[in-house]
Image (cartoon, coloured by chain):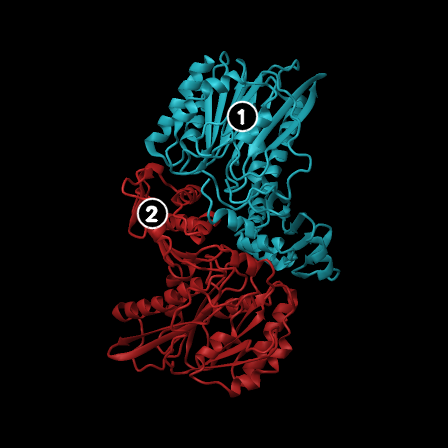
Chain colours: A red, B cyan
Amino acid sequence: MGTDMTLSPLAPKGGFPTLPVIKGITFSAVAAGVKYADRNDVMLACAVAGSTVAGVFTKSATRAAPVLDCQEKLSVTLATDKPFAILVNSGNANAFTGSRGSGSVSAICQAVAEELNTDQACVFTASTGVIGEALPHDRIVAKISELNASLDANSAELAANAIMTTDTFAKGAAREIMIDGQPVKIAGFAKGSGMIAPDMATMLVYIFTDAKISQTMLQTILSQQTETTFNAITVDSDTSTSDSLMVIATGQSDAPEITTGQTADTFTAALHGVMLELAHLVIRDGEGATKFVTVKVTGAHSDASAKKVGLSIANSPLVKTAIAGEDPNWGRVVMAVGKAGEPADRDLLTISFGDILVAEKGWVSESYTEAAGAAYMKNDAITIHCDLGIGAGTSTVWTCDLTHQYITINADYRS
Amino acid sequence: MGTDMTLSPLAPKGGFPTLPVIKGITFSAVAAGVKYADRNDVMLACAVAGSTVAGVFTKSATRAAPVLDCQEKLSVTLATDKPFAILVNSGNANAFTGSRGSGSVSAICQAVAEELNTDQACVFTASTGVIGEALPHDRIVAKISELNASLDANSAELAANAIMTTDTFAKGAAREIMIDGQPVKIAGFAKGSGMIAPDMATMLVYIFTDAKISQTMLQTILSQQTETTFNAITVDSDTSTSDSLMVIATGQSDAPEITTGQTADTFTAALHGVMLELAHLVIRDGEGATKFVTVKVTGAHSDASAKKVGLSIANSPLVKTAIAGEDPNWGRVVMAVGKAGEPADRDLLTISFGDILVAEKGWVSESYTEAAGAAYMKNDAITIHCDLGIGAGTSTVWTCDLTHQYITINADYRS
């Protein structure tokens, strides 16, 4: 846990949303004492036989044992005649724990499979917390009967709370769409606050839907939508060893199977909406964050180039500290564009903060006033728009500011 | 100026070193009121006719006007029958100032050339400070006679002080070598504290020597040695628009010309020593720094791969905040190795803090104790050594910790 669990000032006002029940999905949570005392730290999610599963994971070269296990299991076509389970613990990442790490994963998967009468290949796990300490998996195994006994379709919020570490609020999002006149629901939750950077599926995210959809199609849509949602956010440029994003589709909706064309577009848009909302909530709970920052890059050589420039701005400590200080220091934005290593021409660059044109044609705009810039920076949501003026590439990424509280949390944190 | 100019705790105890006089080089400084009141903010360095000049500069796509001017002038073989001059101002970077930026550079170069009876092609400038404000070059031009009148071979420290911005101390270094029984001297100074990251010649660095050496050879040696000195340090991963490193050789030593073989090796080693010492001093004055950190990577796929892994560790906010908190959080080092995108195998990784073996073969070392790690982290110089165990590539980079003071300086700084 962080040193200060004050609710993020960017937390949504309404608290955790009421998520719709997803037919075929149940949740439970329990206090296993993995590390934290007096709080739930293990969650179990179960999906009925016939469900399909997809996932994306961190690309870190030092991936945690549960990530390697999930990736291996998802590399083949999964059976559809058995129930699926996801078990997640907080307080210990089971990362860089040598051969004991995979031993812990096996022990947990075996116990869950036995309890739920399914195959170990249908059980996925994740662990989040401190790196390099042996996971006391016996404490988790001892609680699996209790987890099974308390499974409930209405317990998503309980599950979302159990997987938090430095998070100051649980993050949930949902969408409901109509396919051929029949409702299809998507609901998910996420945890994540620090060690958040792209090139991954950020932190732990679990999304559930009652859509009928094949494993292949679900994986394809998920992978595509990750690039513009979870892979487009950054809190601190540091990439976790444990990032996992999984989607389970139970097929329990009365809507027809999602294959191609209009139904696929509708489902993809709704899934994208849930993913983006959860990604934004992770930024809103960024360690020490006081500003929600959107960085929009247009006119770049390509979309990929625009994203690199966007992330160069979003990861710049000098840009992020300026935002924390409510300083419209657009010179640092110029610096961050310059260091990105992407095609750019100083004299074609246009920079806006919100609707305020700040700089154009290589210099400060004639209409810009420092007073207008300073007033804009007092908002708790800031949009920085850079048009590079050399092409048609665009990208949007999201970040937060870099504050004293980030230092306080991380200069003595061992979750 | 920063909000708190307390001397860095990592500043050398002895203050600015006594630099040897370099035959043929003189310095002066003056208060021109570019931005700061009541302090010198412009320095002039002059070199006699017959000198040779070399330089390396930022690779930023949004380079400042003086940088573009210097690069253009150094792209050809320079005349050797005229004196050279370097004029530097602090308080304003003359960066992102459109066509007015190059106009200011021309006005200054013309005035200096007239005053010193040389060509504009022999006059180099640099500007450091806030980005995006027009440089009031008239204030500088008005002081050029005064600068010329006060030129003195003993005024290097005065010049080094005039170019500081958020620096808390002036940085100087020197070496003396014997070539064929004759002394050759090298002396230089640097400024830099924030917006320090590789892929450049970091910030402003000026080195002077009385060696006899051709422009081509001087440039070759300088470019080579930059990679392991100024391009191997990082304060905050942000790359300046103004970074400039120049060397002037006056040829006034009685030693023979430096060409190839032993004399070149001796000179290169001495120049490398001055460059590395100045680069380390920049880290020791890193904004908010309380720890001097050496990151050594061995056993990598290649030297280039080792450097990427080293910089991934040195630029990680989570590693840097852990060091600030004196937390031996080697799990964050594992994370930073993992996110570097370079070949690495979790189970072959060996990590040491100083002489303490922390982790090996994918897990914490049997001999490691948290008490030993915590005691080591209290030192003000920390060495992190990662052996990747997969090849022969090595690299060493240097950085500092990330502290509250960095946030304080940058959340409301406009130098």
Q: Secondary structure at mark 1?
A: helix
Left/right of residue A71 with respect to residue A360 in the rendered view: right
The amino acid at mark 1 is Gln
Task: Please tell me in which quadrant of the rendered image residue A342 appears.
Answer: top left
Q: Secondary structure at mark 2?
A: helix
Chain name for mark 1:
B
x%, y% of residue B148? 50, 17
Identify the disc placed on residue A11. none
Read off the residue under disc 1: B219
Q: Are marks 2 and 1 in contact (CB under 8 Å)?
A: no
Residue at left offset 38%, top offset 80%: A22
x%, y% of residue B393? 62, 44
Residue B294 shows in this picture: no
The amino acid at mark 2 is Ala
Chain name for mark 2:
A
Mark 2 vs mark 1: in front: 2
Q: Cα distance, mark 2 to mark 1?
A: 46 Å
Task: Single out the residue that lies furthest toward the front.
Answer: B38
Task: Single out the residue that lies furthest toward the left.
Answer: A181
Residue A200 shows in this picture: yes
x%, y% of residue A341? 43, 42
Task: Single out the residue that lies furthest toward the bottom.
Answer: A149
Left/right of residue A344 with respect to residue A235 in the rendered view: left
Pick the quarter of the image with the N terminus of chain A. bottom right
Count of labels in the image: 2
Task: Please tell me in which quadrant of the rendered image residue B231 appears.
Answer: top right
Q: Nearest the camera: B24 or A299?
A: B24
Q: Nearest the camera: B383 or A121?
A: B383
Read off the residue under disc 2: A371
